[in-house]
């Protein structure tokens, strides 16, 4: 797992780098003292995990996370302030480490991050005959792609909605997005991937599929309009 450390405190960066060396398979590829430099670096050098401070000059860690929307990078916030925790967890981060934290607490956060990272490699496979195979309640089931209306992120799980049933699997939206064929499916929100052929109507702020309103985030709106040939 490749990781970045982004923190304007030298001691904090050194501490995190030292702890990270104790984790097998974890490599710190770069360190940054501000979020803007980290953001610019990430445009051409994606990583799996970011240890991210919140209060930094020019751009905060929360602002950086919002700017990375759609990349699905695993985020562990490291902050000395409790008051940002609620807003942070609304961004679907892996964990929130309150400084100063113990090595044991760091290991706990890394366990969560590793689980998310591993889930990207599992649970979803596409066959050549247009079926999706999902592991549902420890049983691998065959799900026809044409039956899927949309997929929704639910924490560490993804829910696939069909007319008859909802399938819940352990995995990430990034894993689902990578495996669902792009000619049939498109991401419209951090939490939603939809089947283009199942769209009933487009309206301000979202779309309707099978009676369900699904929000369309600004970052994905242009791509959706192009796919739908909307003028």
Image (cartoon, helix red, strand yellow):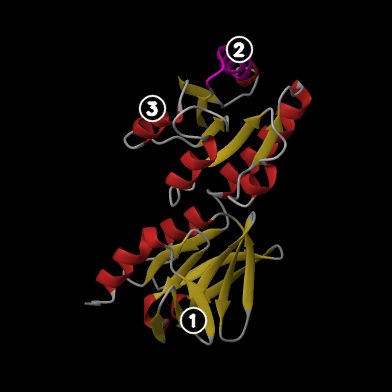
10 within the magenta span: yes
Cβ–Cβ under 8 Å for marks 2 and 1: no
Precedes in sequence: disc 3 or disc 2: 2
Q: Tag 1, which secondary structure?
A: helix
Q: Tag 2, which secondary structure?
A: helix
Work out how far the residue at label 3 is from the one at label 2, CA to CA, in angstroms.
19 Å
Mark 3 Cα within 10 Å, few/some/many (few <14, many 20+)? Answer: few
Work out how far the residue at label 2 is from the one at label 1, CA to CA, in angstroms.
53 Å
- Which secondary structure is most common in the magenta stretch? helix
Part of the protein shown in magenta: 8-17
Precedes in sequence: disc 2 or disc 1: 2
Residue 13 is left or right of residue 229, and the answer is right
89 within the magenta span: no
Q: Quadrant of residue 84?
A: top right
Determine whether 228 is above or below 221 in the image.
below
Q: Mark 2 or 1, which is nearer the eye? A: 2
Precedes in sequence: disc 1 or disc 3: 3
Quickly name the residue at label 1.
147
Residue 176 is left or right of residue 78, and the answer is left
Quickly name the residue at label 2.
11
Q: Tag 3, which secondary structure?
A: helix
Instruction: Say which mark, if any, is on residue 37.
Output: 3
């Amino acid at each position: 797992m490749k990781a970045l450390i982004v923190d304007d405190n030298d001691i904090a960066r050194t501490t995190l780098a030292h702890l990270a060396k104790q984790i097998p398979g974890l490599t710190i590829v770069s360190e940054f003292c501000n979020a803007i430099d980290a953001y610019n670096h990430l445009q051409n050098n994606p990583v799996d995990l970011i240890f991210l401070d919140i209060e930094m000059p020019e751009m905060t860690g929360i602002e950086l996370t919002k700017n990375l929307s759609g990349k699905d990078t695993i985020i562990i916030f490291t902050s000395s302030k409790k008051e940002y925790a609620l807003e942070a967890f609304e961004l679907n981060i892996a964990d929130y480490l309150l400084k100063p934290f113990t090595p044991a607490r760091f290991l706990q956060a890394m366990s969560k991050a590793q689980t998310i990272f591993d889930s990207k490699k599992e649970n979803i496979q596409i066959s050549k005959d247009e079926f999706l195979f999902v592991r549902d309640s420890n049983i691998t089931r065959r799900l026809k792609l044409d039956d899927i209306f949309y997929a929704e992120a639910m924490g560490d799980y993804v829910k696939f909605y069909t007319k008859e049933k909802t399938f819940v699997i352990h995995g990430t939206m990034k894993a689902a997005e990578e495996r669902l064929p792009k000619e049939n499916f498109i991401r419209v929100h951090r939490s939603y991937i939809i089947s283009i052929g199942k769209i009933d109507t487009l309206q301000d702020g979202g779309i309707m599929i099978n009676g369900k309103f699904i929000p369309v985030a600004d970052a994905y709106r242009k791509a959706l309009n192009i796919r739908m040939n909307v003028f």
